[in-house]
Image (tube, rainbow, N blue to C red):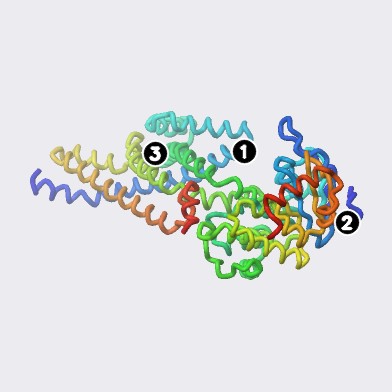
Amino acid sequence: MNSNSAAHLLKVEDVHKRYGREEVLRGVSFTMERADTKVIIGASGTGKSTLLRCINKLTDPDQGRVWLEDQEITGRRAPVNNIRSQMGFVFQDFNLFTHLPALDNVRIGPQRVKGIRRREATAVAQEALATVGLKEKAQSYPAQLSGGQQQRVAIARALAMSPKLMLFDEPTSALDPELIGEVLEVMIKLAKEGMTMLVVSHEMGFARTVADEIIFMEGGVILEQAPPESMFRNPQHKRTGEFLRKISDLYGESE
Amino acid sequence: MTAEIWSQVWQFTPTLLWAMLINVQLLLALIALGLVTGVVVALIEVYSPRPLAALALAYEWFFRGVPELVLLFLFYFGLTQMGMDISPFFAAVLALGFRSSGYQSQIFRGAIQSVPPGQLMAAHSLGMGTMKTIRYVILPQALRLSIPPWSNEFSAVFKDTTLAYGIGVVEIVRQARYISVRNFPLTLPVFILVAFMFLVLTYLGNWGLGRLEQRLHVPGLETHAKRGEAREL
């Protein structure tokens, strides 16, 4: 059954997803190794977020298979919750639990999913909050935090599960421009510390700083995949070049 | 009404208070039954597949559509005729409790649906299954949001406990009737006293629920429409 024999950290094989008549993903395959950071770019509606959600099965792919190491999440009897608990997911609009202070938002995973004792889970949560620089906000409710702080708590919530892989779905798109930097800073730190990260984002500064590869998606497939510098300097497809120029104009090159 | 009449009524106050205790017991039992059943019905309506959800809606339709007294008769005489040895009190708890669950489920359904779907995705992404998500993410928010409308239901069913009179529960109205039948001049003052007791107790109940709401208050959870404002603080 296990055809992830090369034991990639993540292997995505021929994933398809259709919404009604529209086929959003039309056969996507790629792999990631430990400590890789890959950034997925592409125009809106090309299936980037759907792909990310197919990887942890928040969306069910119609076809194709996904492995985290040797566990296939798309398998018929796969322990989906268990495999999900090994992947962090950071959403565009944070999705913190409104009724819980920051610390409890972060602690709920280790305590309720992994079943770690409360005291230990608290220590894990405090450490995760410290990693994102929000130790002093442990008792604040989401509504009392800025967007940037909420997103950092959301990153801490994912981190507290000690994931093998973190998926980021446009983590800075819902933020005011002056709050983007603090979130990117945390993500850069994580990447440099060796976290395996798959990021849907148009932050080219981030991509150039830490991405091992950029994945350019168009029309539900991966059109091109290459390290940032070579993709910028020498795109293989005309569309890639056009798109890179367009977002560089829009977002600028700085962080 | 003379002072003498009121002093006679005064003698009966302890009797009436004891009878009121029956109404309070009835209230607590039926509202607890209605709460648990109402939450379950609401969860089924929101999260389960069509046929089951339709069944829950039919349940709601039935218990909201049949008059309380008819429900009381159906439960008491129905269950008795089926050979069950059921006390009027217990029949009243069932009839009024299930009826209340039909109203409470609508309160909870609205509150459950107002928890943003993104938070459910976030819970799933952590590896929480449906049950854990309901327990740790949905219900703590939905139940908080339900307190204000639930207070109305609380006052309504408290007054409805007097309908148990109809199947012979010796609750406060029946006790007041016993007193007034034997002492006709006391009829009006006795019922004024009964009315006064209900006014005081509903006031206390709503005050307590208001306190509970304050205690459980979480910034940003008033209603989700207000979240944007709260963030500015």
Mark 2: amino acid: Ala
Q: Residues within 10 Å of mark 2 (few under 14, many from 20)?
A: some
The residue lying toward the viewer, choosing from A212 and A26, is: A212
Q: Position of residue B170 (x, y in %)?
A: 32, 42
Query: Mark 2 vs mark 3: same chain?
Result: no
Q: CA distance from mark 2 to mark 3?
A: 69 Å
Q: Position of residue B186 (x, y in %)?
A: 15, 41
Picture quadrant of residue B23: top left
For residue A84, side relative to residue B95 (left or right): right
Residue in the image at 48% along x and 30% along y: B61
Which residue is denoted by mark 1 in the rendering? B48
Q: Can see residue B131?
A: yes
Task: Identify the element where label 3 is drawn.
Answer: helix
Q: CA distance from mark 3 to mark 1?
A: 35 Å
Kindly check if marks 2 and 3 are in contact, taking CB atoms under 8 A apart as contact: no
Which one is closest to the eye, mark 3 or mark 1? 1
Q: Can see residue A31?
A: no
Q: Residues within 10 Å of mark 1 (few under 14, many from 20)?
A: few
* Chain of residue at mark 1: B
Q: CA distance from mark 2 to mark 1?
A: 38 Å
Which one is closest to the eye, mark 2 or mark 1? 2
Query: Mark 3 vs mark 1: same chain?
Result: yes
Q: Residues within 10 Å of mark 3 (few under 14, many from 20)?
A: many
The residue lying toward the viewer, choosing from A246 and A7, is: A246
Mark 1: amino acid: Ser
Picture quadrant of residue B159: top left
Which residue is denoted by mark 2 in the rendering? A7
Mark 3: amino acid: Pro
Which residue is denoted by mark 3 in the rendering? B88
* Chain of residue at mark 2: A
